[in-house]
């Protein structure tokens, strides 16, 4: 298979993200704000090294593209980029809080509904079309959310906020075309770091001491932030977005497994029904993509 490396890269990216809860739980005794601050600090440093060490030509090209825009178009691009950085702050902060202070299955549920929510936002904000089957899937997703709300409105609220901020991030960044994605991410993370420094005293009330915290946050920045993003971008060079969308569900699958097997989180009947409905909704929503991926895989293997 000519694209085997790209498929493996895409799979590896979402498998890595699926294990993200493990290092987060290892430093759950530290504040969420401190974890977020140093995750973004280390991610920022790594991305700066990547951009200025390996992507200087792309950086010059991106700056030339930006200068070629009209003032209005340039302002919109800058605004969307900065808004993306702000959304990443909220999404990462919420996710870390949920994993360490609520439960892992709530974080997993957020990324189960995130692709459906992304498509729904795309429908309203970008006039993207949804098929009748996908509207049925959206309805089922809504039913699942209602059931999860009956079980715990607080957990549903956390899941919804996490899914909504990431979905809004994805939709908002679709308009930023023609730019290197790693460079755009580096700018957004740098902007996020600047914002966090304005609230440093609130986020980091007690500066962590000892190598354990900094070792884990550096690992989170490199292994669970920059590396899977790089693998995801590498996969997108040869694999279409529909296939990547299917592979994305590896993330919550592994997260759910860790929640139940490693951390012994419990699940009641309402949650089982809610999770079952969302699985059906996900299958229906992505059925055309499933068929396309299956046909592509069949062609590659024959």
Image: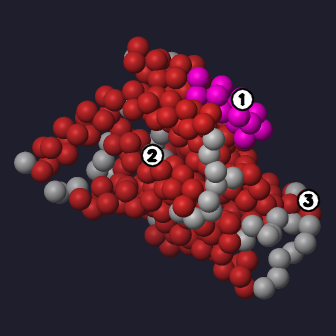
Rounded to the nearest whole Å, what is the CA distance between mark 1 and mark 2? Answer: 25 Å
Front label number (3 vs 2) = 2
Marks 3,2: beta carbons within 8 A: no
Residue drawn at x 36%, y 50% is 236
Residue 129 against residue 2 in the figure, above or below: above
Per the image, the residue denoted by label 3 is 202
In magenta segment, residue 88: no
Per the image, the residue denoted by label 2 is 249
Residue 36, quarter of picture: bottom right
Question: What is the number of callouts on the image?
Answer: 3
Residue 240 located left or right of residue 98: left
Q: Name the dominant secondary structure of the magenta segment.
A: helix
Give the magenta-colored segment's residue range: 143-156
Residue 66: tell me if it is visible: yes
Per the image, the residue denoted by label 1 is 150
Q: Secondary structure at mark 2?
A: loop
Residue drawn at x 39%, y 48% is 247
Residue drawn at x 39%, y 27% is 284
Front label number (1 vs 3) = 1
Pointer 3: residues within 10 angstroms few (<14), some, or many (20+)? few
Give the mark nearest the N terminus, 3 or 2.
3
Q: Secondary structure at mark 3?
A: helix
Rounded to the nearest whole Å, what is the CA distance between mark 3 and mark 2? Answer: 35 Å
The residue sitting at the front extreme is: 269
Residue 218 located left or right of residue 4: right
């Amino acid at each position: 298979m000519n694209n085997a490396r790209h498929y493996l890269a895409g799979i590896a990216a979402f498998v890595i993200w699926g294990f993200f809860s493990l290092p987060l739980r290892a430093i759950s005794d530290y504040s969420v704000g401190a974890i977020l601050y140093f995750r973004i600090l280390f991610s920022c440093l790594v991305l700066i090294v990547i951009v200025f060490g390996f992507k200087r030509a792309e950086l010059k090209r991106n700056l030339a593209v930006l200068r070629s825009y009209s003032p209005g178009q340039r302002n919109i691009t800058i605004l969307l980029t900065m808004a993306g950085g702000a959304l990443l702050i909220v999404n990462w902060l919420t996710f870390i809080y949920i994993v360490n202070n609520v439960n892992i299955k709530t974080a997993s549920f957020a990324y189960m509904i995130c692709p459906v929510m992304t498509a729904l936002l795309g429908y309203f904000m970008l006039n993207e079309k949804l098929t009748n089957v996908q509207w049925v899937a959206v309805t089922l997703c809504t039913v699942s959310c209602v059931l999860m709300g009956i079980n715990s409105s607080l957990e549903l609220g956390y899941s919804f906020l996490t899914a909504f901020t990431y979905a809004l991030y994805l939709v908002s960044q679709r308009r930023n075309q023609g730019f290197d994605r790693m460079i755009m991410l580096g700018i957004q993370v740098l902007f996020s770091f600047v914002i966090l420094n304005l609230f440093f005293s609130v986020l980091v009330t007690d500066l962590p001491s000892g190598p354990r915290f900094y070792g884990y946050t550096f690992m989170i920045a490199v292994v669970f932030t920059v590396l899977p993003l790089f693998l995801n971008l590498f996969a997108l060079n040869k694999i279409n977005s529909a296939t990547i969308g299917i592979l994305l569900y590896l993330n919550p699958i592994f997260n759910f497994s860790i929640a139940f097997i490693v951390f012994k989180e419990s699940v009641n009947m309402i949650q089982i029904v809610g999770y079952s409905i969302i699985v059906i909704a996900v299958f229906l929503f992505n059925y055309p993509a499933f068929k396309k991926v299956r046909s592509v895989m069949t062609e590659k293997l024959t």
